[in-house]
Image (spheres, rainbow, N blue to C red):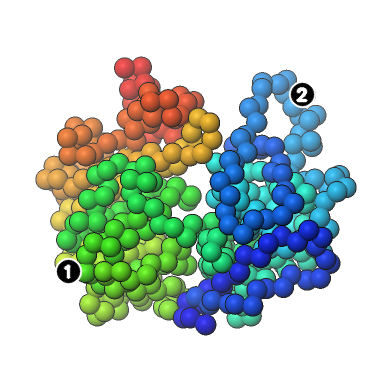
Amino acid sequence: MEQSGQVNMGAAPMPQAPTAAPVAMPQQMDMQQPMAQPIPAPQAMPPAVENTPAAAPIAMSPVDPVAQQAQAPQQSFSIQAISNTVPNSEVRIESLLEECVRTKASDLHIQVGLPPILRIDGALQPVSGYGDLDEGTVERLVFATLEEDQKQILIKDKEFDYSFSFGDLGRFRVNAFHEKGNIAGAFRLIPNEIQSINELGMPSIVTSFADFPRGLVLVTGPTGSGKSTTLAALVDKINREKTAHIITIEDPIEFTHKSIRSVVVQREVHYDTYSFSAALRSALREDPDVVLIGEMRDLETISAAITIAETGHLVFATLHTNSASQSIDRMIDVFPPHQQPQVRSQLSNILQAICAQRLVPAIGGGRVVAAEILIANPAVRSVIREGKTHQLDTIIQTGADQGMQTMDRTLVKLIQTGVITYDTAREFAVDLQEFERLARG
């Protein structure tokens, strides 16, 4: 067992004729929007990931509201009426995780009263061949990925974040929780391979974020927008190119980094430290060069991040915000009013860059990243210091020569290059009036 308390599940091939025996965990444990067609279940899983294209969502045609209401039961995720489904007693978590990897799904959802659900290219799709899961089956599937002490935490706290390795196929970040008195689980697939910024399709300016000697770099966006993937690419670049001491504080650990040129220390909340704030307080005594904060959740964490950046270290952190201006406001607004002028002054001095990103469904399947980029220049620092963050959008629009770009302009470029549709882009626009003006022009 290693310190982080994370499970390493071996990826066993799916049996041709599953038995009714309970799920057996592999022997090696490494503790550390429309609905589309059902996903066809393969007869046997290959030992490695296949480049199988994801199922495309069904294009929905306009229908009469009355007829649509009458058809609603047929569009339910529930498939109890299908007779050739795998019995609940024979459902194995390994098979479901393999299917998630095979179809390149981002998430697997397990819940009482529904079949297993995958999210592919942003759309939820039930896995064919599986019926509605009962309470005992869901509990068995989730508990199969937990150790005994983790089970007790889940039962006591009603929710629990953890991660585990699934052989050579990937890692999964999991939130297990209770709903309607039953256990449920959301499994997020994390690839083993860390892609570069260019391979991710990010603006090239983002690569330079790893070259800042000190300061604060924010990567923001809603859940599932690829923030962790972007940060992993930046940490990997530093690890390969510099001799630095990198400390990551995560809940849970997602991408794992092996020390190459740098020394990489990865700490997981609940296993290696009690909280983000506790880990950040001790980080300054651990001789860091770079500190990655998985999520800035509260005043204490944000305050500690500012302090570490002020003392000459490079800090990477995430926020659940949709734009650069929202990110600045979020960090300032958590402080009491009498402290906000001081925090604005501190942020104006330490901020280096903000990348606010979204994953947008692409034409023909898959998703493409769209990002708003803010680079802290004298004008940006002055606006932050004076509390005029509403002017940041204008500065970004006029800072294209420095690598800045607004989300709306990025979306329009993706339309013009035939990557996404106008209707899809409109759903992700930050300022609809500005987006439509750019689209017409």
Q: Nearer the viewer, residue 408 or 56?
A: 56
Residue at figure coordinates x 31%, y 17% from the top left: 441
Question: x%, y% of residue 101?
Answer: 58, 54
| Label ID, residue 49 | none
Q: CA distance from mark 2 to mark 1?
A: 64 Å
Residue reaching furthest to the left: 378
Q: Is residue 8 left or right of residue 418?
A: right
User: Which badge, 2 or 1, comes first in the chain's sequence?
Assistant: 2
- Residue 356 visible in image: no
Disc 2 versus disc 1: nearer the observer: 1
Badge 2 local density, few (<14 within 10 Å), some, or many (20+)? few
Amino acid type indicated by mark 2: Val
Amino acid type indicated by mark 1: Thr
Residue at figure coordinates x 74%, y 27% from the top left: 68
Residue at figure coordinates x 56%, y 67% from the top left: 167
Question: x%, y% of residue 8?
Answer: 56, 72
- Residue 430 visible in image: yes
Q: Which residue is mark 1?
A: 311
Q: Is residue 127 left or right of residue 246?
A: right
Q: Quadrant of residue 94?
A: bottom right
Q: Which residue is mark 2?
A: 66
Q: Secondary structure at mark 2?
A: helix
Q: Is residue 131 left or right of residue 163?
A: right
Count of picture labels: 2
Residue reaching furthest to the front: 47
Residue at figure coordinates x 62%, y 65% from the top left: 11
